[in-house]
Image (cartoon, rainbow, N blue to C red):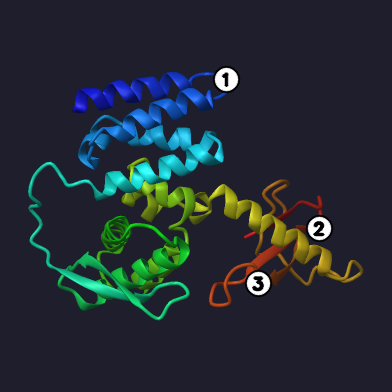
Amino acid sequence: MEEQAVKFNKRLQELLAQPSLDAASATDVIDQIAKQQFNMAVVKKAMLGKSVSQVMRKGPAPLKQKIKSLLEAWKKAPAAGPSTSAATSTQVRRRSSGSTSSVDVEFSKTGSQKRDGMRSVIIRRIVSLNPGRSQKSVADVACKVEEAIFNKFRNDGDPYKKECRSRANYLKNEILDKLIAGELTPEQFATQAEQKLVSEEDRRETEQHLEQALRDKNPGQKMGNRTNQLKCGKCGKNDVEYYEVQLRAADEPMTVIATCIKCGHRWRQ
């Protein structure tokens, strides 16, 4: 089975090497892969998940949807052998969208009340950002991400909890797909700069919000506060005017919009 996965990976890499993706050929290969009963262990060992994710980013919408379904199927596939984990499982209850019924999401417990609480927080955030995702993939990603963040801090104090809540906001779209496919490891997700975790879709949306915020601001009004604590990435000067605007959820930090007095370079942080 692993040999088949390697062959499929080679075919996808050949398609990806072309100047533009042949969507028809890629769809044919994905359809053939979907007929195989690969599990995540085989997919990761053959590096197939990475290639599939690359095809998804380049392919048209119908192909993207096929690949998302394939990734979900891989996550649901039984492992090659019995799990060696001694962890028990618990459940997170959530309200399904538009309904009063609840859905149980089981996840592995750590034995720490604080850590299990943060796993619940991450699961609920993934569910709210990604309606329709399989419970198994949601729980699996949440537990691995929490563990990576815990290993980063080596304790369950406030910085750890704040990091869990903050990074949970990026667990959607292509970032979640990369984690499911094994293209992005939980350790990379936990340690990368948060700017690198923003999906292209979110990046475009943020830019639109930013442009709207700038249009709404009185053109004759100064940018706001002037400071030497911010440094322009273009000219290196520390003479900057800035103001803050709410681009994300109300409970998230405000975004700083800054303009360099010397060269006019504008950025956000």
- Say which residue appears at 47% left-offset and 37% top-offset: 56
SS assignment at label 3: loop
- Residue at the disc numbered 2: 261
Q: Which of disc 2 and disc 1 is earlier in sequence?
A: 1
SS assignment at label 1: loop
Q: Amino acid at mark 2?
A: Ile
Coordinates of residue 46 in the picture (x, y in percent): 26, 29
Disc 3 from disc 1: Cα separation? 40 Å
- The answer to whether 122 is drawn above or below residue 73 in the figure is below
Count how many numbered circles sit on residues in the image.
3
Q: Amino acid at mark 3?
A: Gln
Q: Which of disc 1 and disc 3 is earlier in sequence?
A: 1
Lateral position of residue 198 relative to residue 44, left or right? right
- Say which residue appears at 33% left-offset and 35% top-offset: 34
Is 129 in front, or is 47?
A: 129
Foreground label between 2 and 3: 3
Coordinates of residue 103 in the picture (x, y in percent): 31, 72
- Residue at the disc numbered 1: 19
Q: In the rendered image, is residue 182 in sight?
A: yes
The residue carrying pointer 2 sits among few (fewer than 14), some (14 to 19) or many (20 or more) residues within 10 Å by Cα, namely some
